[in-house]
């Protein structure tokens, strides 16, 4: 594919926000003291700035028109570009993915000292080579399953690339709800429910004991965390893997419940009786290695 017009979406580093923009006194004091944690933050910032500059320089040298925006400046829907390039870590890639329907994405890990970069095929060193492979069609974007949600029949605009957490607004409180999968329905109490795509199965769901899935799989799964079963109770719907033509339904029995989409930044409220439906939706097209989850599968053996 010939790249003519690209949107670059980048994060603002913690150092940039705290030291340069807010000039936060506690942060500046830690810098002056040579604090170990802050030194790591500064290193990550320097790596990020250098990577962003390399990305922009490479696009300019190739005559590719681009606009560079921080992720908070990105429009609700990104259109009329050939490629979106996220420069940051997985959080930046996830945020950028919510603005995409048909435009493909490429993640660039801007600070490998501080970011795992699970979704990032590119980095500072190989970015030029990856662009070559994209333009010569040596690599093609992968279609990755995303989830859509409805609350009381109203679709939520953000599509889920990674995971959903349904829980009480307080992490110390009990999450109460009805869960319905297929012909089975249960009333449960727990610390909440993780619902994950294959892409998100290596994150929090894996830590909670869920199954690691291969990235190209066309399924999704759920896992109840810390079920609060009383003596003599036995629940069927504690975990499961659903096909792409299936859905699941959760009815809130919480006055202040919440739905978290792909991390802590996108939150939708659930109150008593609110109905949440989760099912597969429009895929994301992204340049990601199809075997990216395999490292976690190998680690289990």
Image (tube, rainbow, N blue to C red):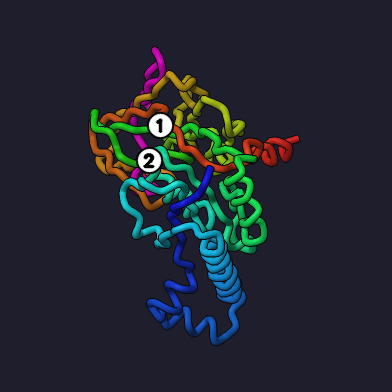
Q: What is the number of callouts on the image?
A: 2
Res. 207 in view: yes
- The answer to which image quadrant residue 269 occupies is top left
Nearer-N-terminus badge (2/1)? 2
Mark drawn on residue 282: 1
Q: Is residue 186 magenta?
A: yes
Residue at the far right in the pictured view: 301
- Residue 27 lies, with reference to residue 290, above or below; the image says below
- The answer to which image quadrant residue 191 occupies is top left
Judging by the rendered image, the residue that carries numbered circle 2 is: 167
Q: Residue at x 73, y 37 (%)?
A: 298
Q: Residue at x 64, y 40 (%)?
A: 138
Q: Position of residue 87 (x, y in %)?
A: 51, 58
Secondary element at image label 2: strand
Q: Is residue 64 magenta?
A: no
Of residue 258 and residue 268, the one placed in the foreground of this image is 268
- Residue 79 lies, with reference to residue 212, above or below; the image says below
In the image: residue 168, left or right of residue 153 = right
Question: What residue span does the magenta drawing correspond to?
Answer: 165-187
């Amino acid at each position: 594919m010939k790249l003519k017009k690209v949107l670059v979406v980048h994060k603002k580093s913690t150092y940039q926000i705290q030291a340069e923009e807010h000039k936060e006194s506690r942060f500046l004091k830690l810098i002056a003291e040579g604090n170990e944690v802050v030194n790591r933050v500064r290193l990550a910032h320097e790596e990020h700035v250098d990577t962003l500059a390399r990305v922009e320089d490479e696009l300019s040298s190739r005559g590719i028109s681009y606009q560079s925006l921080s992720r908070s400046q990105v429009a609700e829907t990104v259109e009329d570009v050939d490629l979106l390039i996220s420069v940051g870590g997985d959080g930046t890639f996830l945020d950028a993915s919510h603005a995409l329907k048909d435009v493909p994405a490429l993640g660039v890990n801007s600070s490998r000292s501080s970011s795992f970069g699970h979704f990032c095929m590119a980095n500072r060193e190989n970015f030029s080579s990856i662009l070559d492979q994209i333009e010569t069609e040596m690599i093609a974007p992968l279609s990755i399953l995303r989830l859509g949600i409805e609350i009381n029949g109203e679709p939520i605009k953000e599509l889920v690339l990674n995971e959903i957490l349904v829980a009480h607004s307080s992490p110390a409180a009990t999450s109460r709800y009805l869960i319905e999968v297929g012909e089975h329905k249960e009333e449960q109490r727990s610390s909440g429910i993780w619902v994950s795509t294959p892409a998100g199965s290596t994150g929090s769901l894996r830590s909670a004991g869920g199954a690691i899935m291969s990235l190209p799989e066309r399924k999704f799964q759920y896992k109840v965390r810390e079920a609060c079963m009383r003596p003599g109770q036995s629940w069927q719907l504690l975990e499961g893997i659903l096909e792409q033509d299936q859905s699941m339904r959760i009815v809130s029995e919480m006055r202040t419940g919440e739905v978290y989409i792909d991390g802590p930044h996108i939150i939708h409220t659930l109150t008593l009786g609110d109905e949440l439906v989760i099912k597969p939706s429009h895929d994301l097209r992204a340049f990601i290695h199809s075997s990216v989850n395999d490292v976690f599968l190998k680690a289990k053996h």
